[in-house]
Image: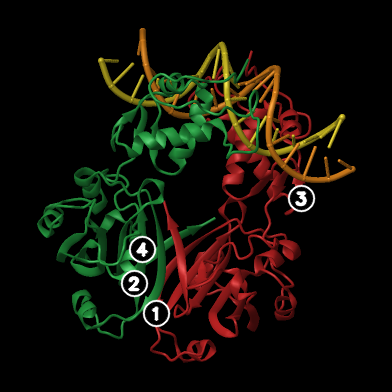
Chain colours: A red, B green, C orange, D yellow
Amino acid sequence: MATDAPFSAPLDAEPLTPSPSAGWQGQAPAFSPLYQQIKALILQSLQQGEWKPGEVIPSEFDLAARYKVSQGTVRKAVDELAAENLLVRRQGRGTFVATHSEQQVQYRFLRLQPDSGSVDSEGPAQRDVVECRRQRASAEVARALDLRSGDSVLQARRLLRFAGVPTILEDLWLPGGPFKGLTADRLSQHHGPMYALFEAEFGVRMVRADEKIRAVLPDADQARLLDVDTATPLLSVERVAYTYHDVPMELRRGLYRTDTHHYRNELS
Amino acid sequence: MATDAPFSAPLDAEPLTPSPSAGWQGQAPAFSPLYQQIKALILQSLQQGEWKPGEVIPSEFDLAARYKVSQGTVRKAVDELAAENLLVRRQGRGTFVATHSEQQVQYRFLRLQPDSGSVDSEGPAQRDVVECRRQRASAEVARALDLRSGDSVLQARRLLRFAGVPTILEDLWLPGGPFKGLTADRLSQHHGPMYALFEAEFGVRMVRADEKIRAVLPDADQARLLDVDTATPLLSVERVAYTYHDVPMELRRGLYRTDTHHYRNELS
DNA sequence: CAGTGGTCTAGACCACACT
DNA sequence: GTGTGGTCTAGACCACTGC
């Protein structure tokens, strides 16, 4: 029998288009395999907060029943979401919504490493918020965050020290709407990754990011904060971080000292 | 019946350890799922050159027969190898051994992009080999390439120009053994990616690479070649490239100008 | 048309974690 | 033990490619 018109779903799921077996008349109206449709539905539930970061999602068996497909099809959808780091599978326990608040994969997006020793060996970073205020989006910020020039954005600057040595200076911009209520105090008092705070307090989960890296010289302010002179070359890392569905939610410009650390990248 | 002792194979394949169903006595002597073993066997065939870059490998059906497993198990093994960019699947045609010699994915490991416009818009790079000679491995080079200090290595330096502007200066070291016979002329005369030449002429296929990135200032020589002054910050990209089984086969130190280009990285 | 990879199903059994 | 994800199989049908 296989796929015979999976109409009418129990809780959600509009009629899914099965892999063209029965129907499939007309042109090609954006056909996609069943598991891709399941993937989209799971993604939607994630975005709408039906399952929150750190929580378990229903078992493959339950999801299969809910979407009226076989367990194998759900499996393939979940596999892809796990490969994209949106879900985490744990044998014997279940499948969980990924989170930035875990001891394990803290600083998932930070690629700077000490030249010798592991990331953990230097202990947690010391974080100091230098400034934090609301302002109007410049044209450049607006473009990166998909806003209009002049829209309210929250701008912050912070300094990270490793073993007491100032190493990273970051400027960041957040859209005012989703982050209403975020203050310097809130940022300062929070322990753990900033993206964990965004998750917990504002329901904004960063899913992926793009970085553009350049070598630059600091201005006087930047040099002072990083405790280097203005002739010291630094890594400029411009990051745009995205939530679900590729919506940009953060622009971040980092200046990294690379005298004792390096940016690590794996190519394949 | 499922997995009942798949003993005796036709062409290769020592007795595979099935997912523990029947046997599985004794301790846990490094058990691994069947598809992982199949993956290892395919990898071995790739390494030994049974199928060469650009060629088709046998169909999933044939491989399943050869290894005496189901098609689905072969599929999972091939899926992983395709995800690692070792194989390329093409619907309706077959599965091919990945190669660096394709118009499509040229410069697969080069992350430098023009600030505006696509990678292709600036046309092919102009490549000039500045020098190329044999020398003894320094301690540092030996460590990176898994050689002994003093072993013969081939060192080369080349300059890449985009639209006439010198943008990348690269020094690279190759183990003397595998690259016996490589000369400056051979390097200069070759068109297309260097890794394509390595594949075609020396049977060395680069599979993955690690990069360490820093911001540095050039010395006088480097500045002259890149047509910048010695106060211009540059990106230092130190790459170790690996063949099959994580054997290091190249150490490369690149200096990138980032006034019109940037290093792009996608995080997830 | 035949052959390839791609999707989907159904069912069995295993490894692991919690209770 | 019960329930979870992980592996493996067997077979069906679809989509794409090239003869």
Q: Residue beneath label 3, please?
A: A55
Tell me the amino acid under the disc marked 1: Val
Looking at the image, which residue is at 23% across and 77% down? B222
Picture coordinates of residue A258 (x, y %)? 45, 77
Circle 2 — which element? loop
Residue A119 in sight here = yes
Q: Quadrant of the C terminus of chain B?
A: bottom right
Picture coordinates of residue B246 (x, y %)? 41, 51
Question: Mark 3 or mark 1, which has the lower sequence index?
Answer: 3
Query: Are there few (<14), some (14-19), or many (20+) residues within 10 Å of tag 1?
Result: many
Q: CA distance from mark 2 to mark 1?
A: 8 Å
Tag 2 and tag 1, C-beta contact below 8 Å: yes
Q: CA distance from mark 4 to mark 2?
A: 26 Å
Question: Mark 4 or mark 2, which has the lower sequence index?
Answer: 4
Q: Which mark is in front, 4 or 2?
A: 4
Tag 4 and tag 1, C-beta contact below 8 Å: no
Q: Which mark is in front, 3 or 2?
A: 3
Q: CA distance from mark 3 to mark 1?
A: 42 Å
